[in-house]
Image (spheres, helix red, strand yellow):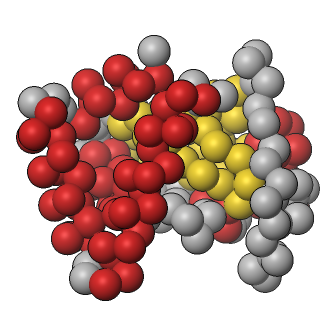
Amino acid sequence: MSAPMLNNHERVMKEEDFIISKTDTSGKITYCNEIFMYMAVMTEKQLLGKPHSIIRHPDMPKAVFKSLWDKIQNNEEIFAYVKNLSSDGSFYWVFANVTASHDNNGKIIGYYSVRRKPNPQAIETIKPLYAEMLRIEKNNSVNASMEYLTDILKKEGISYDEFITKIQN
């Protein structure tokens, strides 16, 4: 997908919707459900075999994805808020859960992601945080952006997982 012209149209998931996708170990999409295709405004043919980053919105800090990859490659589950880009230039927010998929010997063979509608108040908390992380990345580095997030969590006295769960509920 060539970069679409961004617009301010937000696509909103229904409460009962679940976006499901699977990727190989390099992040290429091997499965996507109908709701994923609908929200991304793409066909299965346009998605399969493409890197999951095909739907990455430029408002997303790279540090969020670095953290995601670090966790899932270490066999850890992660929850995250993600702003995705649709092929028509619109966007949609998701509350994502990503886990590793294993073969019968326990070897990671890919990743499985289930996304649902995020709590709207959580997104209002996340937007300024991500905006600042993105600003730090542009002026410094992805690592500086991660340090910023880590410092905020330390000051609050909570872990990343506790923070994400707290604002979703």
- Which residue sits at x=67%, y=67%? 54
| Residue 26 image offset from top left, x and y in percent | 47, 64
| Residue 17 image offset from top left, x and y in percent | 76, 24
Viewer-proximal residue among 71 and 87: 87
Viewer-proximal residue among 15 and 107: 15
Position of residue 26 relative to residue 11, above or below, is: below
Whether residue 158 is visible to the viewer of this picture, yes or no, is yes
- Which residue sits at x=38%, y=52%? 129
Residue 11 as seen in the image, left or right of residue 58: right
Whether residue 69 is visible to the viewer of this picture, yes or no, is no
- Which residue sits at x=62%, y=64%? 57
| Residue 87 image offset from top left, x and y in percent | 83, 65
Residue 56 as seen in the image, left or right of residue 69: right
Residue 62 as seen in the image, left or right of residue 112: left
| Residue 151 image offset from top left, x and y in percent | 12, 51
In which quarter of the view is residue 165 placed? top left
Position of residue 162 relative to residue 148, above or below, is: above
Q: Quadrant of the C terminus?
A: top left
- Which residue sits at x=79%, y=48%? 10
Position of residue 67 relative to residue 118, above or below, is: below
In which quarter of the view is residue 38 placed? top right
Position of residue 6 relative to residue 47, above or below, is: below
**Number of numbered markers:** 0
Q: Quadrant of the N terminus?
A: bottom right
